[in-house]
Amino acid sequence: MRYAVMNSPLGLLTLKASEKGLSAIHFGSAVPSHAVVDLNAHRENLKQLQEYFDGERMVFDLPLDIEGTPFQLAVWKELQNIPYGETRTYGEIARQIGKPGAARAVGMANHENPVAIVIPCHRVVGSDGSLTGYAGGLDLKKKLLELELQPDPQGQLLFT
């Protein structure tokens, strides 16, 4: 595993990758003491994340090396279908993967998402449009949504 730490508008992000692809993004500096820091191995990961934060990238095109249950993998795949600047509810995601009663399980899968931002779990909101749960905290979720969402004509963001 190779690690890199980048400064972002959200603070420090630690990236972890195998030879196959990006396997984790952690909020803060989380490089184990024995780990190999290799910015070159993360060149494309860092580039695409920076483009995202600069408002120049709406879709990530990175190889991923993530593991999860079949349910988690289905949720994470569906999250990648949420367009930049849009949100979906946990219930909508559950219906899209053919599990209409599994909104809470979708929330748990979101919580276990190993590559937040790249797999945009921040785009999932409560059934009433409210911000709910985010591994990095609701403040970071709000910042990510503000980065993507355009205000309505009165200057108000379209979520609560």
Image (spheres, rainbow, N blue to C red):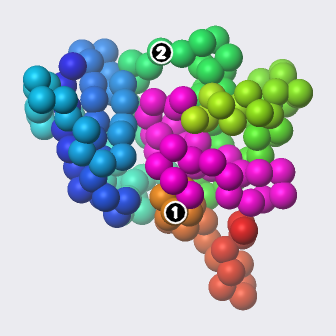
**Farthest residue toward the front?**
33
Counting from the top left corner in percent of width and height, residue 127 is at 83, 51
Q: Which residue is identified by label 2? A: 67
Q: Is residue 38 left or right of residue 22?
A: left
- Which residue is drawn at the image coordinates 47% and 40% (left, top)? 116
Residue type highlighted by circle 2: Glu
Residue 79 percent location from the top left of the image: 63, 36
Which mark is on residue 129?
none
Magenta stretch: includes residue 121: yes
Element on which disc 1 rests: helix
Q: Which residues are magenta?
A: 112-138
* Residue that label 1 marks: 139
Pointer 2 or 1: first along the chain: 2
Q: Is residue 50 magenta?
A: no
Q: Horizontal placement of 8 versus 73: left or right?
A: left
Distance from Cα at disc 2 to Cα at disc 1: 27 Å
Rendering coords of residue 66 (x, y %)? 44, 19
Task: Give the residue displayed 81% in from the left and 39% down from the top.
Answer: 92
Q: Is residue 149 visible?
A: yes
